[in-house]
Amino acid sequence: MTIPRQPENEDLGYSDTPVLNSGYTVHDGTRPQPPVVSAPADAPPSDAVILFDGSTLAGWKNVRDGESCGWKIEDGDMAVVPGVGDVQTEAVFGDCQLHLEFMSPVDVVGKGQGRGNSGVFLMGLYEIQVLDNFDNPTYPDGTVGAIYGQTPPLVNSIREPGVWNSYDILWKAPAFDGDTLVSLAAVTVMLNGVVLHHAKELEGPTQHKVLAQYAPHEAKGPLRLQDHGDLVRFRNIWMREL
Ligand code: MG
């Protein structure tokens, strides 16, 4: 059987087709082409904002006092310095795609919430848990990849201590009209390529032992990483605003 081939001019679009909700026709050739992004196998996409590339902590500051970050670079990794406190980017974002990699110490110390604990706070407020949950049970809404205090991940795809893990996160920021919440935050999270949350809505900013509750905030916020007293490392952190 031969597949009928369109005439060459129709490869570029049609104008005699029905109109979509967008106002364009089906297969409209006048619609803007998607921008080209190069996506090499061993580097961030060409349009990514690089938040940590292994060489500098410029662009990061300490949450406590707004001064210099206070964490350190070790072997090209960004390492928590316990007691220094959380750190955050000067860059702010709303809806975004975030990639980062993290590793728990190979020398296992502690258990439950006290093992390899850190966190990825989207917009500085909403935590996706970082924890060494390799053969280390804790309360489900506090496991690695949990929307902390709200929703456990669908699965636990953590690797053993001393092995790098990757997070790929799609973030939809909440929207406010004045003091009124008009749309909830939602997140899709993949840990090592495995889906932990699929467009899961959040109940509000992260809390410990109490219910989350939304409060109006700016449309954009920083990426914040948690110092929970454990020697967690990060690398290859980049973000694309959507
Ligand atoms: Mg944490």
Image (cartoon, rainbow, N blue to C red):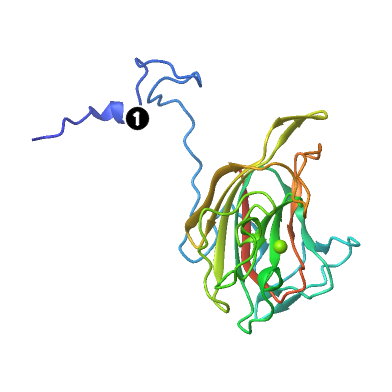
Crowd band around label 1 with a 10 angstrom C-alpha radius: few (<14), some (14–19), many (20+) = few
Residue 28: percent from left, percent from top? 41, 24
Which residue occupies the extreme right position in the image? Answer: 65
* Picture quadrant of residue 140: bottom right
Which quadrant is the N terminus positioned in?
A: top left
Which residue occupies the extreme bottom position in the image? Answer: 107
Which residue appears at 70% of the width and 66% of the height?
118
Residue type highlighted by circle 1: Leu
Residue 226: percent from left, percent from top? 75, 64
Which residue appears at 59% of the width and 72% of the height?
136
Residue 170: percent from left, percent from top? 58, 48
Q: Is residue 178 above or below residue 236?
A: above
Residue placed most toward the observer, 173 or 230: 230
Residue 39: percent from left, percent from top? 48, 56
Q: Is residue 201 above or below residue 30?
A: below
Q: How many marks?
A: 1
For mark 1, what is the residue? 12
Which quadrant is the C terminus positioned in?
A: top right
Disc 1 element: helix
Which image quadrant shows ligand 1? bottom right
Q: Is residue 169 left or right of residue 73?
A: left
Residue placed most toward the observer, 127 or 95: 127
Which residue appears at 39% of the width and 22% of the height?
26
